[in-house]
Image (cartoon, rainbow, N blue to C red):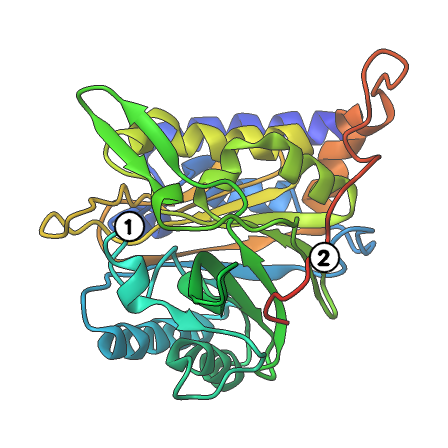
Amino acid sequence: MKHFTNKALSLLIKSSALRPPTSCRLSCRFARINPILANPIFARTMATSSTPSSVLKKPIKLACVQLASGADKAANLSHARDKVLEAANAGANLVVLPECFNSPYGCDYFPSYAEPLLPSPPTQEQSPSFHALSSMAAEAKVFLVGGSIPEVEKGKGKEGEEEKKYYNTSLIFGPDGALLASHRKVHLFDIDIPGKITFRESDVLTAGNKLTLVDLPGYGRIAAAICYDVRFPELAMIAARRGAFALVYPGAFNLTTGPMHWRLLGQARAMDNQCYVALCSPARDMGATYHAWGHSLIVDPLAQVVVEAEESETIVTWELDGAKIDETRKNIPISSQRRFDVYPDVNEGKIRFEEPDVPK
């Protein structure tokens, strides 16, 4: 088998040196696909195993919708529906929208666009975004990671006055339109890079307090988190150790942090955990107050970026295969080589998978 693989790859390299495959040339206009992975010779050489994976029961096609959104919430929701249906019609089973897909991104916008999600389910009047996402998932018959939306929770302060808390919240729906899980952004985006960007989500937002695992019946389990959460490897490591075949991050990096770390972080989380990683960004709008990096991408368990968008609106897709996860973990068996006699096990101890009063 090793001789066959080496020979096939040798032929691939020779043929690729002459010209890239036509399908790759066409697809690379709007999203860069790794030319080696797109080559049919490589695809035949690395054929899917007939043995079901212990992590991903059968292949699933994932689509990241790099959506262009504006100030009109109703228009954003309608546009998102069109793009989710487009992804589903192209064969996607799991569709991801970007962070704050229903509104502009920024501390000035969170309160005015925020919707109450409790008690769950909210009414159509309370949360048009909740109902739009539920309807999209059901109409498209897909699992839908609904990017994120600003959420408001109303309560009473110590003196009895009305108190409002705002969250950056992702809602995940099943193909029947039912809510499967929700994730409130755990790590708030508070940074100060002199001469570049200063941003403090904590001036407006409250952090969530749990790690989010989502079971997709018939396939397996994913982890959902939001943007800045990707910088914290503990969340990803625990999720992978608890059986997640993919780590899914709606996010909105900017023109400073994007070129620095967006791609690198996706690869790092995939390499650390030997699973798939999806990062889904809004499209870049230089007329907005916040300029998103774009470059939505999917990374495989070997930390190869298999497909990546440019900055404009598009959809990037890839079929996730459990055999690829199993092969990677078999060939580089870090899961059985950890030394918990030398350092602590992050998967043990106090880990929050639940918190009171969250949409569910």
Count of numbered labels shown in the rendering: 2
Quarter holding the C terminus is: bottom right
303 with respect to 339 (left or right)? left
Instruction: State the residue at coordinates (52%, 58%).
Output: 158
Q: Which mark is residue 175?
A: none
- Residue 78, percent from left and from top: 29, 79
Find numbered disc 2 in the image and state the secondary structure of the residue it sits on.
loop
Number of other residues with Cα within 10 Å of mark 1, as a class: few under 14, some 14 to 19, many 20 or more:
some
Q: Quadrant of residue 16?
A: top left
Residue at (66, 59) in percent of width and height: 59
Asked whether residue 209 is in view, the answer is yes
Q: Position of residue 338 (x, y in %)?
A: 83, 20
- The residue where tag 2 is placed is 354
Q: Which residue is mark 1?
A: 107
53 lies left or right of 173: right
Instruction: Using the rendered image of the protein, determine whether residue 8 is visible from the camera's viewpoint.
Output: no
Q: Which quadrant does the N terminus fall into?
A: top right
**For residue 33, which quarter of the picture?**
top left
Q: Secondary structure at mark 1?
A: loop
Badge 2: few (under 14), some or many (20 or more) residues near its Cα, within 10 Å? few
Q: CA distance from mark 2 to mark 1?
A: 27 Å
Residue reaching furthest to the left: 287
Residue 321: x and y in percent read: 66, 51
